[in-house]
């Protein structure tokens, strides 16, 4: 009888421990690409994007695997590829050769013809999901992750019509919106996710661009407010409009940028002035921000790639894109992530792996 009681107590304590675990999110440094790992309290895992391809594929896959090891997961239950740009799907084949991926999720075919993406989708990708599950996400779909309410809010250029719980109020920023040139690239096709864990809310829209943000957020704010925003499009100015950044009122924003990718002054002004924003965290110091628009170093996971005796206050000009553009410095040394651990009551802690600086945010109102 005594032994049975001890076993019952042990099982009850174990169950209590499992129920009190956090939702852990790792924003991983893949050099201006994107890779964000979610690990639910159940242990179920979902990765958004796999970083760069080519010579960088092994590097980025190893960085993702390091985050998985830290999180205690050995497989990926779900993989969302937001869109078919090389900095978002390039590391997939390399990663899939080393870890099991049970479900592959995407928006469908490539709308921006490019040899690398077209070849990948024609040959490699079908081979990767042949023994797994393949899902083409539609706005309004839910992804089954135990303990989380995971909703697809944008995909293939379309968006949800019915607001998520807590959304649906008029968006006052729509009245002053000024459209940019219509984006016909893969960025506008991005798969966007709204994730709820108890009272904690996260938004990740991939590289969804300026005009598509308006479509999603106007005239209604269909997303409501969030606790954590993974800043769109690495913090570039062709995304991150006021109709999104100011309407969602993020308490914390994390920008997965590169040294010379993202963080342009135009975007930083909008992000920094978002109502209710307590802190912005960055994966890299942005030379495009300079000291003028950046955050204190304790909020930056990776510094500059080429040591300098002094950092200029003024931002540098972004290099014009094209085949003649000079490449950004390569960072192949230690790479540090930013980790978020969230409680179901809405409290969460953000930690910079470079310096172990942590800050805890109390539950929102």
Image (cartoon, rainbow, N blue to C red):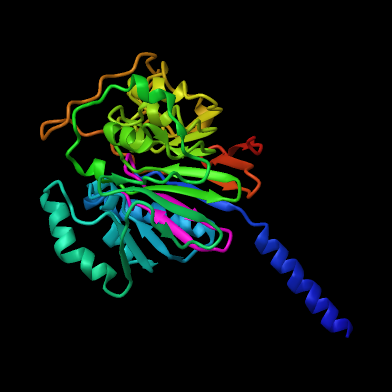
The foreground one among 268 and 227 is 227
The chief SS type of the magenta part is loop
Name the image quarter holding the C terminus.
top right
- Horizontally, residue 79 falls left or right of residue 121, namely right
Range covered by the magenta-colored residues: 31-51
Q: Position of residue 79 (x, y in %)?
A: 37, 59
Q: Residue furthest bottom?
A: 1
Q: Taking 63 as reference, is 338 above or below it?
A: above
Q: Residue at x 46, y 54 (%)?
A: 150
The foreground one among 64 and 80 is 80
Residue 42 within the magenta-colored segment of the rendering: yes
Q: Taking 291 as reference, is 140 above or below it?
A: below
Q: Position of residue 325 (x, y in %)?
A: 15, 30
| Residue 310 found in image quarter | top left
Q: Position of residue 135 (x, y in %)?
A: 31, 63
Residue 336 visible in the shown view: no
Number of marks present in the image shown? 0
Q: Residue furthest right?
A: 2
- Horizontally, residue 305 falls left or right of residue 18, namely left
- Horizontally, residue 260 falls left or right of residue 1, namely left
Q: Residue at x 27, y 61 (%)?
A: 93
Residue 6 visible in the shown view: yes
The foreground one among 236 and 270 is 270
Q: Position of residue 81 (x, y in %)?
A: 31, 54
Residue 28 within the magenta-colored segment of the rendering: no
Q: Taking 171 as reference, is 11 above or below it?
A: below
Q: Residue at x 44, y 22 (%)?
A: 294
- Horizontally, residue 147 falls left or right of residue 206, namely right
Name the image quarter holding the N terminus.
bottom right
């Amino acid at each position: 009888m005594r032994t049975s009681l001890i076993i019952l107590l042990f099982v009850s304590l174990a169950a209590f421990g499992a129920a009190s675990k956090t939702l852990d999110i790792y924003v991983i440094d893949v050099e201006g690409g994107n890779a964000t790992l979610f690990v639910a309290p159940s242990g179920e895992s979902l990765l958004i994007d796999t970083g760069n391809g080519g010579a960088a594929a092994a590097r980025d896959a190893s960085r993702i695997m390091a985050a998985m090891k830290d999180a205690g997961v050995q497989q990926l239950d779900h993989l969302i590829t937001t869109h078919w740009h090389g900095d978002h799907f390039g590391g997939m084949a390399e990663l899939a050769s080393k870890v099991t991926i049970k479900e592959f999720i995407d928006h469908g075919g490539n709308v921006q013809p490019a040899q690398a993406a077209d070849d990948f989708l024609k040959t490699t990708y079908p081979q990767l999901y042949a023994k797994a599950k393949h899902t083409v996400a539609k706005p309004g779909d839910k992804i089954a992750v135990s303990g989380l309410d995971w909703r697809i809010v944008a995909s293939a250029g379309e968006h949800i019509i019915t607001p998520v719980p807590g959304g649906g109020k008029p968006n006052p920023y729509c009245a002053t919106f000024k459209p940019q040139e219509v984006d016909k690239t893969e960025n506008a096709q991005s798969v966007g996710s709204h994730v709820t864990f108890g009272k904690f809310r996260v938004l990740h829209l991939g590289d969804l661009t300026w005009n598509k943000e308006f479509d999603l957020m106007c005239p209604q704010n269909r997303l409501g407010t969030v606790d954590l925003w993974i800043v769109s499009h690495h913090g570039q100015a062709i995304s991150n409009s006021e109709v999104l950044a100011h309407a969602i009122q993020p308490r914390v924003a994390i920008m997965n940028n590169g040294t010379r990718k993202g963080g342009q002054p135009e975007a930083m002004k909008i992000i920094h002035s978002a109502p209710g924003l307590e802190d912005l965290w960055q994966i890299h110091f942005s030379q495009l921000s300079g000291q003028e628009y950046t955050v204190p170093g304790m909020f930056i996971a990776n510094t500059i790639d080429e040591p300098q005796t002094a950092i200029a206050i003024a931002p540098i000009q972004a290099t014009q894109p094209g085949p003649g553009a000079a490449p950004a410095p390569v960072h192949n040394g230690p790479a540090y992530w930013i980790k978020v651990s969230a409680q179901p009551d809405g409290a969460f802690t953000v930690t910079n792996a470079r310096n172990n600086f942590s800050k805890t945010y109390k539950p929102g109102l």
